[in-house]
């Protein structure tokens, strides 16, 4: 075997090794980034649940809580009022519209439903004659699906109106074909999950993927024009993402969290 052939074999083996090293490096980087993305999704899912639970807790008790056990117990065992919002729209003589909003309490629901589910109301789009519902109670509907038939006063024929939200039909109003309805009158109530129902509420403060670390939480009150208002801040103190760590000099991203110690609001920095 001459020198040229030996060198060719050596170079071929080296190139194979470099190719494998490059592939393994790229594959590992992709897997690492995907792992971070998956973990951060679990973290933001939990932060969204904490935020919604704290808002419901504030409505019930007039304050936020920094006690994870109290918040978990509230989600599991608490009850909150069921309200329905209706609008009465009156056409004024000079072309403007007068909108009157009425909120009624219908009963109470488990706090867990209040946190994880969201209710939507489909209202009559115009004054007119009602000609029937198209879904049944318990049906799951999507945006754009047929909702009800109505002949508006300014139209010559009956039209089909569609849903602008998706969800399960909870209730249908007590109206029959031939009944007159007013614009803004509540016709159909829906519900749907707007947060991940699989979040572990028993360990609400535990940060996913952190081996037992918990979220930092601050609750307090600040003065706003002479009125003391509640504030809350919840954040991940030990980000898994290197770009979010305090040691990252670039500081391109903040640790995942929501709220503020010095301002009113519960916006999340992942949104």
Image (cartoon, rainbow, N blue to C red):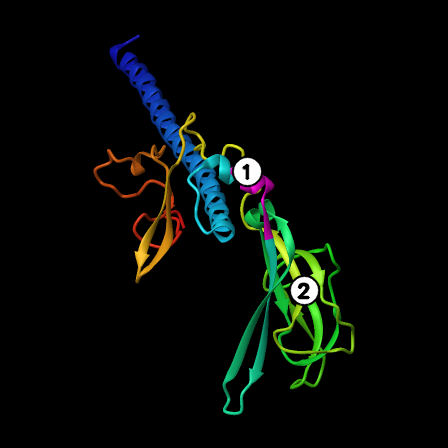
User: Dot 1 surroundings within 10 Å: few (below 14), some, or many (20 or more)?
Assistant: some
- Residue to which mark 2 is pinned: 188
Viewer-proximal residue, 14 or 151?
Answer: 151
Q: Which residues are magenta?
A: 72-80
Q: Is residue 157 above or below residue 142?
A: below
Figure quadrant of residue 139: bottom right
Prevalent SS, magenta region: helix
The answer to whether residue 75 is magenta is yes
Q: Is residue 204 visible?
A: no
Left or right of 240 on screen, residue 169:
right
Check disc 1 and report the residue beneath it. Answer: 73
* Badge number at residue 201: none
Kindly tell me whether residue 114 is visible in this rendering: yes
Which one is in front, 168 or 65? 65
Secondary structure type for disc 1:
helix
> Which badge, 2 or 1, is on the more N-terminal residue?
1
Q: Image quadrant of residue 133?
A: bottom right
- Report the residue at 58% width, 44% height from top: 78
Q: Quadrant of residue 132?
A: bottom right
Is the residue under label 1 in contact with that under label 2 (CB below 8 Å)? no
**Residue 191: percent from the left, percent from the top?**
63, 55
The image position of residue 58, as x and y in percent, is: 47, 50
């Amino acid at each position: 075997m001459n020198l040229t052939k030996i060198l060719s074999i050596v170079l071929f083996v080296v190139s194979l090794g470099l190719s494998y090293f490059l592939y393994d490096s790229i594959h590992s980087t992709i897997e690492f980034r995907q792992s971070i993305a998956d973990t951060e999704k679990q973290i933001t899912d939990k932060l969204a649940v904490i935020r919604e639970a704290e808002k419901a807790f504030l409505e019930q008790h007039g304050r936020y809580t920094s006690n994870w056990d109290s918040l978990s117990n509230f989600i599991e065992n608490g009850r909150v009022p069921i309200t329905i919002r209706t609008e009465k729209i009156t056409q004024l003589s000079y072309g403007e519209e007068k909108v009157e909003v009425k909120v009624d309490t219908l009963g109470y629901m488990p706090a867990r439903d209040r946190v994880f589910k969201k209710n939507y109301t489909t209202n009559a789009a115009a004054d007119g004659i009602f000609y029937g519902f198209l879904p049944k109670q318990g049906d799951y509907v999507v945006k754009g699906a047929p909702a009800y038939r109505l002949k508006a006063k300014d139209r010559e024929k009956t039209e089909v109106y569609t849903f602008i939200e998706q969800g399960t039909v909870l209730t249908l109003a007590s109206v029959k074909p031939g009944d007159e309805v007013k614009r803004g009158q509540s016709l159909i109530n829906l519900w749907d999950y707007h947060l991940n129902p699989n979040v572990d509420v028993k360990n609400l403060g535990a940060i996913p993927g952190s081996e037992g670390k918990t979220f930092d939480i601050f609750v307090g009150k600040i003065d706003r024009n002479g009125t003391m208002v509640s504030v809350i801040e919840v954040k991940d103190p030990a980000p898994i993402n290197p770009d979010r760590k305090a040691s990252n000099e670039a500081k391109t991203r903040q640790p995942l969290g929501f709220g503020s110690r010095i301002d009113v609001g519960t916006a999340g920095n992942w949104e």
